[in-house]
Image (cartoon, helix red, strand yellow):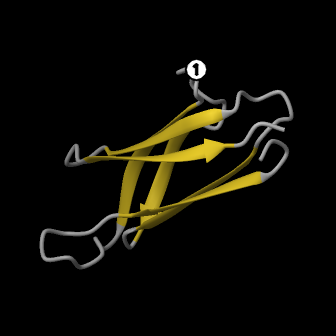
Amino acid sequence: AKGDTVQIAISIEEAQGRPTQGLLPLRITIRDSQGVENEYSDFYLAQDGKAAVTFPLAKNDPSGDWSVTARELVGGATGRAFFSVAAD
């Protein structure tokens, strides 16, 4: 809901399903339901296959389905997930 905090957990695995070891640079892009890139979109580091992004939803952020795209910058693998922001 608007005014809440969103927590995004990102997991990066090797082909065998094990977490990728070491540090990996990521580009995380968060888009609201209107397709506008959120200010918390940025470059992040995954450590041993895990990264987390936490950000607040403003009261005036649009409701609807938002998207999160994570692109691993060494190998180029990309994943996308969605979450919904409820209207007040």
**Residue 31 at x, y = what percent?**
54, 30
- Residue 41 seen: no
Q: Nearer the viewer, residue 84 or 56?
A: 84
**What is the number of callouts on the image?**
1
Quarter of the image for residue 59 reads top right
Q: Nearer the viewer, residue 27 or 2?
A: 2
Rendered position, 4 above or below 33: below
Q: Amino acid at mark 1?
A: Gln
Q: Element at badge 1? A: loop
The residue beneath circle 1 is 34
Residue at image x 77%, y 36%? 87
Rendered position, 6 above or below 65: below
Q: Quadrant of the C terminus?
A: top right
**Residue 62 at x, y = what percent?**
71, 27
Residue at image x 44%, y 61%? 46
Residue at image x 63%, y 30%? 38
Residue at image x 36%, y 57%? 24
Q: Nearer the viewer, residue 59 or 88?
A: 88
Rendered position, 45 above or below 33: below
- Residue 12 seen: yes
**Residue 83 at x, y = what percent?**
55, 47
